[in-house]
Image (tube, helix red, strand yellow):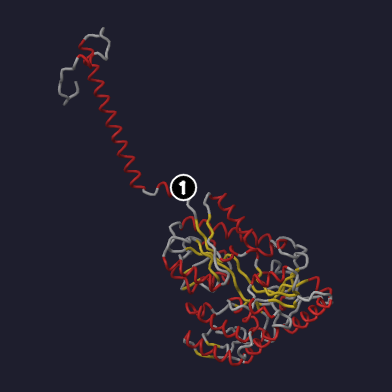
Amino acid sequence: MAPGLRAQRPSNRKLSAFPRSWPRSLRIENLQLAHLRAAKTAAVVCLSSLFFTFLILSLGGCRRAFCQPVTVTILDPEWSQPDELPRAERESQEFTSETGIPLKHLPVPETSLGQLDLLRGLLQEGGSSPDVVGIDVIWPGILDEYLVDLRPYLANEIAAEDPQLIAPYTVDGKVVAMPYHAHVGVLEYRTDLLRKYGYNHPPKTWDELEEMAARIQAGERAKGRKDFWGYVWQGAAGEGLTCNGLEWQIAEGGGRIIENDKTISVNNPAAIRAWQRAAGWVGWISPPSVVAYRELDSKNVWDSGGSAFRRTWLWDYRLAHWQESAMPDRTGYSSMPGGPGGRVGTLGGIGLGISRFSTHSREAITLIRFLIGRELQSRDRARVGAPPQPELYELPLIVDPYPQSPQLTQQRGGVVSRPSSIAGPVYEGVSKAYIEALHSVLLRKTSAPNATAALEKQLIAVTGFKTGPPKKGD
């Protein structure tokens, strides 16, 4: 008998479980062994139950983190655009197939300012969604406090990227987003119509654009196309108008609104001339409704074959997938027209950042790596060979897939950035004031000299900066 067990006289009923042919002493010994085995089994079951209970309690979120896939939410303004939906859906499926991580897309408003208001509101609430956010190139100074510094996680990717593209997403040494799509404002033109009317290249100056647009418009209308227009662009009261206006001003020598030395330069004769020129297009070579056009509106006119020229955005993915455009065999791209001050396209684009409130930061990093990798593949495809379409003429180097082509590089347009990094957190106020002033001129509610003078006062109040002349080559 095991030590510590008290001897008890077993009952005949319990002993009857063993053969009666066994001696009584043998039956008693086997009964005691059976009791010991039952006690040990009960102890093991009890300990196992306690262990698994402790494991479940200690891990807590096991079923959420490991047994069910984590869903990453992304809020990217580009992925809500109609012409981007096929690519977004394709990349989402590829990412989930490769990683097992489902994606959820959050819808966004159409306008840049509406998108900023939505994203800022979500981040200020401190919620765990969205995880990955698409950051417009002009937003980092406004949203940086809510975003993760990506340097520790994407050091190799940052080192491999063009420093010119990283700079707009860097705030006080913190990289708050990775460049995803770098966009540049360009002129889209109908190659067939240019040749039809005797032109062998797209316009290089605004004077040339006006002459070509007016002639082609008159010729097409004479053939019965009464709704055909020479030039469409984005004239609605939104950030797109800031981009257009900046290109007009630079071409005329009117400066960058606010210069790099923090002087407000918008109230000058060259900027006034640029605004007056654009106002003159409305109802002449551009439809009266162009003052309400956003990007999608101008695209609809273009896709229907209703214009000879359009101001649009160009980036590597678009060049690599040129066949997806509405008129791939009749479309060309060139730098924006210029003037005595130069020839530039506004720098735009989207970077990918991570909310510092995200609870899925590891999966968010995985998504950014995946999307950046896909973007690099698109750039490589755009640079392999020389496709017959689209026609590319003197594009800015940043979006030219064939930068070593024999065309004259001195004729290329440059790239200009909006003064968002200079204005920092008050850029939103700067842009709103600029948009309202320029839009009032396009609507012919205010004269250009009065509008720029009033705008100058507003910008002084918003920024606290002093006034000064435009800087040449700034």
Q: Is residue 24 left or right of residue 68?
A: left
Residue 62 in the image: state x and y as whole percent.
40, 47
Residue 302 in the image: state x and y as whole percent.
72, 70
Residue 407 higher or lower than 377, as above or below? below
Label count reads 1
Residue 451 higher or lower than 311, as above or below? below
Quadrant in which residue 30 is drawn: top left
Quadrant in which residue 233 is drawn: bottom right
Query: Is the residue marked by circle 1 packed among few (<14), some (14-19), or many (20+) residues within 10 Å?
Result: few
Residue sitting nearer the eye, 125 or 92: 125
| Amino acid at dot 1 | Gln
Residue sitting nearer the eye, 155 or 319: 319
Quadrant in which residue 146 is drawn: bottom left
Q: What residue is drawn where x is 53% and y is 68%?
A: 135
Q: What residue is drawn where x is 36% and y is 48%?
A: 60
Residue 460 higher or lower than 59, as above or below? below
Q: What residue is drawn where x is 32% and y is 41%?
A: 53
Q: Is residue 122 left or right of residue 46?
A: right
**Which quadrant is home to the C terminus?**
bottom right
**Which quadrant is home to the N terminus?**
top left
Residue 370 in the image: state x and y as whole percent.
56, 56
Q: Which residue is mark 1?
A: 68
Residue 87 in the image: state x and y as whole percent.
63, 59
Kindly state the secondary structure of the residue where label 1 is placed.
loop
Q: Is residue 23 left or right of residue 161?
A: left
Q: Residue furthest top?
A: 21
Residue sitting nearer the eye, 317 or 168: 317
Q: Is residue 434 left or right of residue 392?
A: left
